[in-house]
Amino acid sequence: MMAGQTPVRTFKALSALLTYPGADLVAAIDEIEAVIDDENLLRPAVRRGLQSLLHALRTDDLLDLQERYVELFDRSRRLSLHLFEHIHGESRDRGQAMIDLVQHYERGGLLVMANELPDYLPLFLEFLSTRPPGEARSLLAETSHVLSVLDERVQSRNPAYGAVFTAILSLAGDVRAAPVATESLAEVDDLAALDAEWEETAVAFGPGMPADGCSVDRLRIQMRAARRDARHSGA
């Protein structure tokens, strides 16, 4: 379904559905749905799950839509759409992770505005929509531990928005089907080694930063470190 290196527009469509609902979003709902249907990357059941949100965005009062969005995503850190909130919290590692992600975006041709935080999930998805499918899926899969938690939390509060997370996870291969408990000890040791590599380089930024300091591998190190920490803490 994703022949060649054609970027996946479905990522951008799902990104739009997770943004604050304004008049522009409401006006674009038909186009968003057309992209999802035309690319046909989501299973029929997953596409049906999106219908509730699409219908609400078409028909509900805009102020009601905005109020529900703010109540869902902006009132609780547990439902934050900023990925590093769930990975690093308020630790100093978050700042370095932001720098790495901005630089990775820039290397891919996406310039982040001064008022935007690079770990904002809709922005991350927009970036993925510009990348080759293999790279996009791989990076998305590295965030699956965070997305799975958000999926469960949002589903319990607002299933219409929860369907968007289900759709995103399906593009990553729906890794929830592989329980963490089945991971081998060797993989856990490998994650610990990756963590050590990240810790050694986390403070290296500025003019002397290595050329590969914001590589895909560096981003994966950070995401995998968070997955290991979540497993050990029982989160």
Image: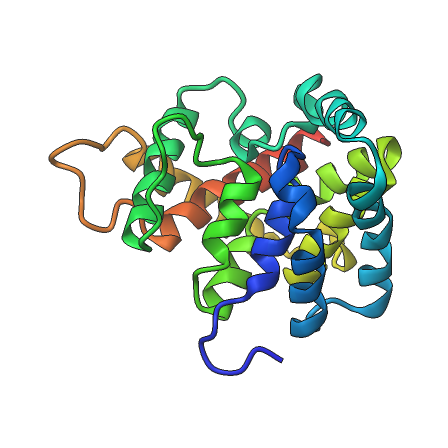
Q: Looking at the rendering, in which quadrant would you find the N terminus?
A: bottom right
Tell which of 98 and 203 is nearer to you: 98
At horizontal 71% and vertical 50% (from top left) the residue drawn is 180
Relative to 235, residue 48 above or below = below
Relative to 69, residue 228 above or below = below
Residue 220 location, x and y as percent? 45, 49
Left/right placement of residue 127 relative to residue 54 reads left
Q: Total label count?
A: 0
At horizontal 38% and vertical 41% (from top left) the residue drawn is 101
For residue 83, what is the image quadrant?
top right
Left/right placement of residue 173 relative to residue 142 reads right
Left/right placement of residue 132 relative to residue 146 reads left
Relative to 61, residue 180 above or below = below
Q: Looking at the rendering, in which quadrant would you find the C terminus?
A: top right
Residue 192 location, x and y as percent? 48, 43
Taking the view exactly as shown, the residue that stands out farthest to the left is 207
For residue 8, what is the image quadrant?
bottom right
- Is the image coloured rainbow, by chain, by secondary structure, or in one colour? rainbow
At horizontal 52% and vertical 31% (from top left) the residue drawn is 84
Residue 214 location, x and y as percent? 30, 46
Is residue 120 among what the camera can see?
Answer: yes
Left/right placement of residue 185 relative to residue 212 reads right
Residue 117 location, x and y as percent? 44, 30
At horizontal 61% and vertical 53% (from top left) the residue drawn is 185
For residue 56, what is the image quadrant?
top right
Is residue 175 among what the camera can see?
Answer: no
Relative to 228, residue 36 above or below = below
